[in-house]
Amino acid sequence: MVRTKPSDLPRPPRAQIGASNIPKPKFPTTRTIYHDNNKIKIYGWPSRGGMMVLNNATLVDFDFLGFDTVSPPLKRDRDQDAEDEVCKRLLLLGATWFDSQDRYDIVAAVEEDFDPLICTIEAGEAPHPTKSERRWVKVGYPSESQGGGLWVAEYDNHVFGAPWHGPGIPDEHVHLLLARNMDERCEVLKQLGARFLDRVEDYDGVGCLRAWEEKWTGEVGPLVVTRFVEW
């Protein structure tokens, strides 16, 4: 079987280096956001609707996306076709595709034990996070010199009030922060129990890795389209 990489996707050009004081974005078409717990999240806004979130983004993720690490993009692309290309690459890294920003806020609140929004679920006003919504997925693509293909590690994110589906995220996942390139990430993923696939098309897990080809409806509601807003 021929091992392939997602090289058919156009690689976005890297932005110019030149950072200034970066504000903490709080807008519905944000690209990159920083949290007080030292985590970086990257958002995508697909034309099909919903919101993609890549949690705990690292240097390797930024490089794969073609983003400048010194002056990261704070806004989504105003051109929807270009935004869709970013969304495709986010999915290839293990991003989760939520129905809307409101739905993501609820799921994130459960993960972070934020009581006001958890009460929404306890009151029956919103469903518990689904198996797919809370799936932790990290992906690495070995260089051609290492044989190509991809390594995929995925675990259940054990959260309040929802049934567990398999082992929880291992503490050793933080080792991914030390990977300097994709080959090093793949070595860490192997240590985390990742499985090897020849092609993205071979993925049959719970995550959203192949969602661009398969997802046309929301997880618990409709896919809500968010248009670009200048700010």
Image: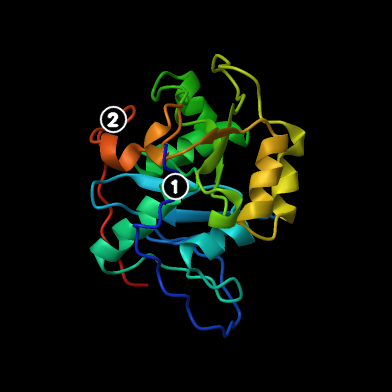
Q: Quadrant of residue 222?
A: top left
Alpha-carbon span between mark 1 and mark 2: 24 Å
Most distant residue in the front direction: 1
Q: Three-letter amino acid code at disc 2?
A: Gly
Give the side of residue 166 with respect to residue 1, left or right.
right
Residue visible at 47% across and 41% down in the picture: 105
Give the number of callouts: 2
Q: Quadrant of residue 115?
A: top right
Sequence-wise first label, 1 or 2:
1
Determine which of the numbered discs, if any, sits on residue 190 in the image: none
Residue visible at 60% across and 22% down in the picture: 160
Q: Classify the position of the C terminus by image quarter.
A: bottom left
Between marks 1 and 2 in the image, the one whose residue lies nearer the viewer? 1
| Residue 63, percent from left and from top | 55, 64
Q: Is residue 178 visible?
A: yes
Residue visible at 61% across and 49% down in the picture: 56
Give the side of residue 176 with respect to residue 164, left or right.
right
Determine which of the numbered discs, if any, sits on residue 92 in the image: 1
10 relative to 100, above or below: below
Dot 2, how many residues are within 10 Å of its Cα: few (below 14), some (14-19), or many (20+)? few
- Residue hosting label 2: 221
Q: Nearer the viewer, residue 94 or 32?
A: 94
Residue visible at 71% across and 52% down in the picture: 177
Q: Is residue 39 visible?
A: no
Q: Nearer the viewer, residue 134 or 167?
A: 167
Q: Three-letter amino acid code at disc 1?
A: Leu
Give the side of residue 2 with respect to residue 177, left or right.
left
Q: Quadrant of residue 69?
A: bottom right
In the structure shown, which secondary structural element does the residue marked by tag 1 occupy?
helix
| Residue 206, percent from left and from top | 45, 27
Give the side of residue 86 with respect to residue 185, left or right.
left
